Amino acid sequence: MHHLPSLLTCITTPASRCLPGKVLQLFPCCIRGSGLFSREAQNLPFLQILRGLRCAVISYGPVTEEDTEFSWCGGLEANSFFFKDFPDGGPPNLVTAEEPACVPGFQSDHLTFSVTRNYLTRGTVLGKVGFTDCTDRTRFLFDTSDKRFVVKTDGVLMVKRPVFLHEGHHDFFIHSWDSQGRKLTIPVSVSMNAADAQVPVLQFPEPGEGLRRRKREWVIPPLSFPENRRGTYPLKVFRRPCQESRQVRYYSITGPGADLPPIGRFTMDRHTGCLYVTQPLDREETAHYTFEVHTVSDGVGQAEDPMEIIVNVIDQNDNKPYFTGEYNANVAEATAIGTEVVRVEAKDDDEPDNLNSDLRYHILNQDPPLPTDNMFEINPVTGSIRVTGRGLDREKYPQYTLTVQAADMAGEGLTGQTKVILTVTDSNDNAPVFTQSLYTAIVDENKKDVEVVRMIVTDEDEPQTPAWNAKFKIVSGDPDGLFTVKTGTNKQEGILSTAKELDFERASKLTLLVSVENEIPFAGVSVVNVKDVNEAPIFDPKEKLVVKPEDLAVDEVVVQYTASDPDTARKQTVSYKILTDPAGWLNVDKDTGLIKVRRLMDREATFVTNNRYTATIGAYDNDAVPATGTGTLIIQLEDVNDNAPVVELRDIQVCNKDPAPQLLSVTDKDGPEFGPPYSVSLQGMSKTSWTARMNDSRTGIILNLATELPSGEYSVILRVGDKHGLEQDSIITAKVCDCRGAEPTCLGRTVGGSNLPLILGILGAILLLALLLLVLLFAKQRKKEEPLLLDDGVRDNVYYDEEGGGEDDQPED
């Protein structure tokens, strides 16, 4: 122990975001909030924390060797400290540097979150997004380009709806706004990388007894480690579990990156078997490393079979796009709109077929911006530059310089630039013109090869080019071929001469018509007046493909699919409607073309073919006779785990003695990511008499009658789940027969009460038949009694007791 006052200097990386203070020298110590270190540091007697300062620590008093290491607050990795004696005169004066101006924005240029599995459930917290607007606010509004993720106002990034990381990673963007309303964006990557959250635990098989060796029954799956990983090296790549063993084992690795060039990038602890990386990795230098792990048991004297380990380096967006040089090309004045002039190509050293190397092109500037500033356009994907404006004129604008930018991450990431120099070449857009319209000359008769006259022309095209050189010919007035015309050496005059001797008596005056043209055809302008008719709006593209999860919520946006009206002069309004939507899943906003979910979509529905659902959208104008254009929307539905597995066979027959196992197939409407291996368990009373387990492929259930049951029908409840735990009960109707072996024969008595419905049916039929016989007997008896009432003989024997005096009872007058 010594008591000299010492200067405590911390070692941290990186220091780019640390605010510096100065004690004899600048050093990057980040002290949060109140300026306190961790609990361990606060208890050290020799430390004095200077509150209010962002970057200074001075120690006074005794310092022991135990005091030389402790951890920062905030969960950062351990930092080493060293001490220097103050110069004579005691501690120096503390000088603090000016705090730099605050810049609103995110606290990094790119966010990477690591997860340990590729299926993220709802509510999973990925991490926290750091953002400041240089005010006292601590909560902000955030938005994401992928609505399956949400950022709370405190910056916590969570999974809003289940996400499956195809190929182990997913990229999107987070947006926020500063106090001035400016939108700020940061790219985000979510990668499945168990090494970031938990160092993998790899099982090394224990050796057999004595000198006998045993083959390993499995291999280690590939490991992943990000390039440019920050931290204090060496860092663990994986570790072994602590296992009790009667033997001491020693570990080592061989291969490129270990004992072969580049030597020493990876090491393995001889005693623990932990694999370490000793320095930051660069995927562009080496994309993966392959090692062999060697294990030797002390006392055995013989090494076990080596085990292969592959470490894949995860790509980060650490390389800007770049062009190999500038581009030079020619474009003719008369080039038609849509003609490709030149194609540029940038390169990116990041991983191919990855968002980090997905480039988009953009023209930043056109010089000169005349006659319009969009004379050219570039295809953002292919880099093809085409002519889009009219008015290319070599005489006015002989050259254009385009500044072209390439940006990775589909146009949202790092950028690189180049120049494209386009030289406008001459087209024959100016016809030669005679300096005078009439030439008069006198020629003696009987003379041949005499020069008659020189005809001068002018041409505004580029001199000494085929578009400028003139050619002459006699059009009319010389049917006998008395004259010839040729072009002078300066290419701008026509020399008319006699080809034959002239005869004054035959013709004293001759009138010739001479024409002039260039060596290449004249590219003149023809004006054609076109009558305007109402054209239908045009969708771009005609067929639009979008990728969406099948569980996209109702009223969530699918895509905005818009059309443009080619009738620009009419200034019409374009409206939208659904033309065909077989399942009725979609709604479209009439005015904006924004398509939303009307009803939940289902990848397994009959309307979906090869995971694609097709709808047609109509765009119509407001003309008196509206014209309608059609666009095709194709939705590629991503599978989610929304269907539990089911048992296909629901009715079986088994013998109650020595029954054969029943194989039941299991199916799942979801894709393979949410399918097998399946699991099964018996439910309810089925557990007492039956057993169920999965077959070796874990795609079928082996059901077996465990105890002898009376013959009859029984319900067996099987709960079947997929590999992500989504379960559903399936009821199997098992008919147990009083027989033995694998071939059930259902004869003999059944379980009491099991034929009760049949007995009741027979009794009901008997009762109905008896009732029908009674009705028939009653009807027959009535039929026999009715004639007795009508018989005349019987009627005479009926006694009538009439009151009120009939006709016979009236007294005679």
Image (cartoon, rainbow, N blue to C red):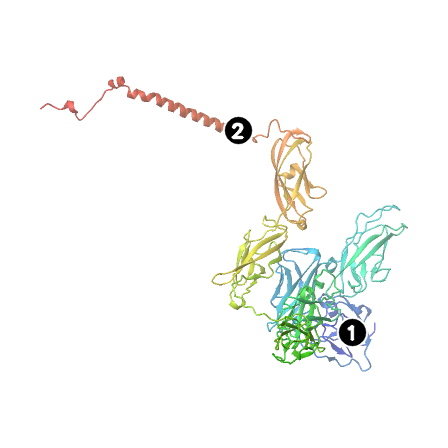
Q: Residues within 10 Å of mark 1 (few under 14, many from 20)?
A: many
Give the CA separation, mark 2 to mark 1.
97 Å
Q: Which mark is residue 374?
A: none
Helix, strand or loop status at disc 1: strand
x, y percent for residue 23 = 77, 78
Can residue 594 be seen at all in this image of the molecule?
Answer: yes
Q: Quadrant of residue 431?
A: bottom right
**Amino acid at dot 2:** Ile
Q: Position of residue 642 (x, y in %)?
A: 61, 50
Of 156 and 397, nearer the camera is 397
Where residue 259 sits: x, y (%)?
A: 87, 60
As drawn, is 56 to the left or to the right of 334?
right
Give the residue number, with chain letter if any, for mark 2.
759
Q: Is residue 615 above or below residue 17?
A: above
Left or right: 689 as drawn, with respect to 4: left
The image shows residue 550, relative to residue 652, as above or below, that is below
For marks 2 and 1, the one nearer the N-term is 1
Residue lying at 78% horizontally and 71% vertically, measured from the top left: 11
Above or below, comparing residue 74 to residue 253 in the picture:
below
- Given the image, on which type of amino acid does mark 1 rest? Thr
Quick one: quadrant of the C terminus? top left
Say which residue label 1 marks.
Answer: 9
